[in-house]
């Protein structure tokens, strides 16, 4: 509903990208569609606290994380209300 509004801390940050991804995956599953690649989804609810448990979780399950590409879905929607793609995230790759 275009008239709905969300109010709260970080309501327009990563949550919009997470919600969009989950809706797309639901539609693929419900419609019998398949992706052309294997998907790995990591939802980190501790990013505001510098993700204290993420490294240990990733180290404990490396076989589940094999991928050709990593996409970080984060950030608010552009003021034009059009979807955007940004390249480069400060501090994410080492």
Image (spheres, rainbow, N blue to C red):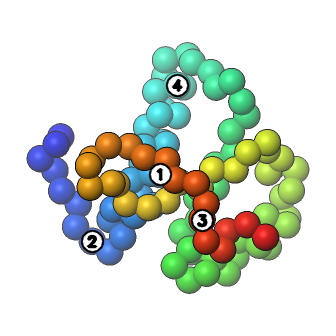
In terms of depth relative to the viewer, which is nearer, 77 or 35? 77
Q: Which residue is mark 1?
A: 18
SS under mark 4: helix
Measured as percent of width and height from the top left, residue 23 is found at 43, 37
**Contact flag, marks 1 and 3 (Cβ < 8 Å):** no
Between the C-alphas of marks 2 and 3, the distance is 24 Å
| Quarter location, residue 61 | bottom right
Residue under pointer 4: 28
Distance between the alpha carbons at the discs numbered 1 and 3: 17 Å
Residue 85 is situated, as x and y percent measured from the top left of the image, at 49, 47
Q: Is residue 57 visible?
A: no
Q: Nearer the viewer, residue 4 or 79?
A: 79
Q: Which badge, 2 or 4, is on the more N-terminal residue?
A: 2
Q: Give the side of residue 56 with respect to residue 28, left or right.
A: right
Q: Quadrant of the C terminus?
A: bottom right
* First along the sequence among labels 2 and 3: 2
Q: Earlier in the sequence, mark 1 or mark 2?
A: 2
Mark 3 — residue?
Answer: 89
Sequence-earlier tag: 4 or 3: 4
Q: Residue at x 27, y 47 (%)?
A: 81
> Which comes sooner in the sequence, label 1 or label 4?
1
Residue at the extreme top: 32
Q: Calculate the distance from the C-alpha at mark 1 to the C-alpha at mark 2.
A: 16 Å
Q: Alpha-carbon distance for marks 4 and 3? A: 28 Å
């Amino acid at each position: 509903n275009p008239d709905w509004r969300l109010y709260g801390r970080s309501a327009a940050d990563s949550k919009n990208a997470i919600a969009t991804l989950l809706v797309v995956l639901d539609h693929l599953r419900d419609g019998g569609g398949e992706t052309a690649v294997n998907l790995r989804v990591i939802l980190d609810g501790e990013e505001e606290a510098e993700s204290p448990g993420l490294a240990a979780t990733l180290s404990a399950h490396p076989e589940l994380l094999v991928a050709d590409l990593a996409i970080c879905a984060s950030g608010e929607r552009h003021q034009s209300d059009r979807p955007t793609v940004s390249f480069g995230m400060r501090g994410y790759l080492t």
